[in-house]
Image: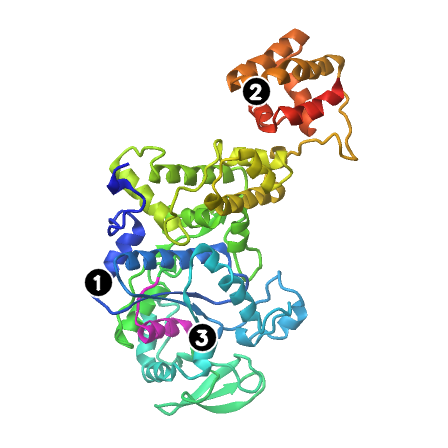
Amino acid sequence: MSNENHPHDNARPAINHWADRVADQIIRERGDLDVYTCASGITPSGTVHIGNFREIISVDLVVRALRARGKNVRFIYSWDDYDVFRKVPLNMPNQDVLKEHLRYPITLVPDTTGRDSSYARHHEVDVESVLPEVGIHPEYLYQSERYRSNMYAEGMRISLQNRNRLKEILNRYRDEQHKMTDDDDYWPTAAFCCKCNKDTTEMVDYDGEYELTYKCTSCGHVEKADLRTSKEIKLGWRVDWPMRWQYEHTVFEPAGKDHHSQGGSFDTARLVADEVFHWPAPVSFRYDFIGIKGGAGKMSSSSGNVTTLRDVLSVYPPEIVRYLFAGTRPDTEFTISFDLDVMKTYEDYDKTERIVWGVDKAKSDNIFAKEKRIYELSQVDGMPEEMPYQLTGGFRHLCNLLQINGGDIDKVIATIGDIKPSQEKAFRTRAKCAWFWITECAPEEFRFALKDPEAADYRKVDLAPVELAAVQGICKDVLPVMDGLEDKALAEKVYEVAGNCGIETKQLFTAVYQVLIGKDQGPRLANFMRIIGRERLEKILKTYL
């Protein structure tokens, strides 16, 4: 490979990836800044699913693109854990206890698993513990702490002083049926009652500065709260979002297509940011939903019917998880597969890897540049020093090796024999994912286990006389010479046995598969025999002599 195609070329990345284009747009629109603040966030109302992860990694990819341009970047991730607990997910224990805390701030709902300090913290920890595995390290902001420490007192004061303007802004994108009227009393703030913790409150009065009076409709308590000292006041999210853009000096934040719909929440927030907080809305883009192959509909944290990043990492190594997102435009809907298409995902990644390392040749310089950039952004911690080990035959061959060896990765590595110590860690991760997929996700027809004549439960298969003769022919006539034959010649030798025994080739295959793995079909027989090896084949087939 030429130097310009070498994977360790440290030149500034060309604008050949959507993250690079967004990074250049940010620089172009915001100019030269000391710090570029990029933001993401979510309400931990339930299990954070892989669809939510799309926003996190989309920001991470743009952050990496900015840093590749020598920029100082602050990557913040906001936990909106001062939001209202509205619905009890089905996947959490002690549902009755959770129901007692409906309308509380999420941060004050107990973790009914007993693992963490609160319901919110439970879901936050699940995410914070897994993101480093895919190379994502944001600065976490906990909105419950920030509101309760009065960090946003000025933002709330500005919002209250501009509530008529906010009302007019919110009306701009509403149709006549949903617009607030002149008689409607609009308040940008809400309160969790300081006596009963519920959000069942009504704003009563505002003194024009920092004092806000509210009444709780649940317990009847009336409170005069000071925005500078009281802990229970917060902004509604349509105002809270642009307020935080100004507070954090956010210059980039994507949003889902529901928020980015025409006249949706992002359009409203943009107006609020411009006209009330005098901060331009961040550069943004719309990202689409993610489906799970075989799953039904849009994932929902509140229902508990979700697939998490941890689930995906059980089947795919971190680099391939990143590749799924780096290789797809964010405004494109795609599915993550747990069925047989898993093999294609591995093959696609491996093809990109071979192109980048010069093993395969790209069809053009542009394709090489594109594949290289996707590969770079797929790595957890920068480009590897050497090409990771690729097994001839790819993921399917790895699955066969694992099943032949009962999932024992050490035996698989010993069988292969040419993995460098520096390549072993990544290979083990891939093998662990492959074994999980085989045992937990793969279709039943794909799974098999090689029989062991020394096992206590070993039983020979009942074969018809012609089938027994064919199996014996394989043992006597093929095994002694198989090591000296190429795959094609080995296959022809097997066909020869079928002809000599007067049996259809398909019937012979079925008999051999039954003897070896107890199934009517399996991997291509000649290659399968090669993988199993002469010694182990003899051990099984000799029981039929």
Q: Which residues are magenta?
A: 236-253
Q: Which mark is residue 29?
A: 1
Real-space CA distance between mark 1 and mark 3, rounded to the nearest whole angstrom: 28 Å
Who comes first in sequence, dot 2 or dot 3? 3
Amino acid found under the numbered disc labelled 3: Gln
Where residue 336 appears, as percent x and y from the top left, is: 48, 46
Instruction: Indicate yes or no whether the magenta region holds residue 246.
Output: yes
Q: In this picture, is 10 found above or below 77?
A: above
Q: Which quadrant holds residue 168? A: bottom left
Dominant secondary structure of the magenta stretch? Answer: helix
Callout 2: few (<14), some (14-19), or many (20+) C-alpha neighbours within 10 Å? few
Mark found first going from the N terminus, 1 or 3: 1
In the image shown, does 35 or 482 lie closer to the viewer?
482
**Which image quarter holds the C terminus?**
top right
The answer to which quarter of the image holds residue 467 is: top right
Disc 3 element: helix
Residue 304's place in the image compared with 191, above or below, is above
Residue 268 visible to the viewer: yes
Give the residue type at disc 1.
Glu
Disc 3 crowd, CA 10 A, few/some/many (<14, 14-19, 20+):
many
Residue to which mark 2 is pinned: 483
> Which residue, given by chain and number where applicable, does mark 3 sit on?
143
Q: CA distance from mark 1 to mark 2?
A: 66 Å
Nearer to us in this view, 325 or 104: 325
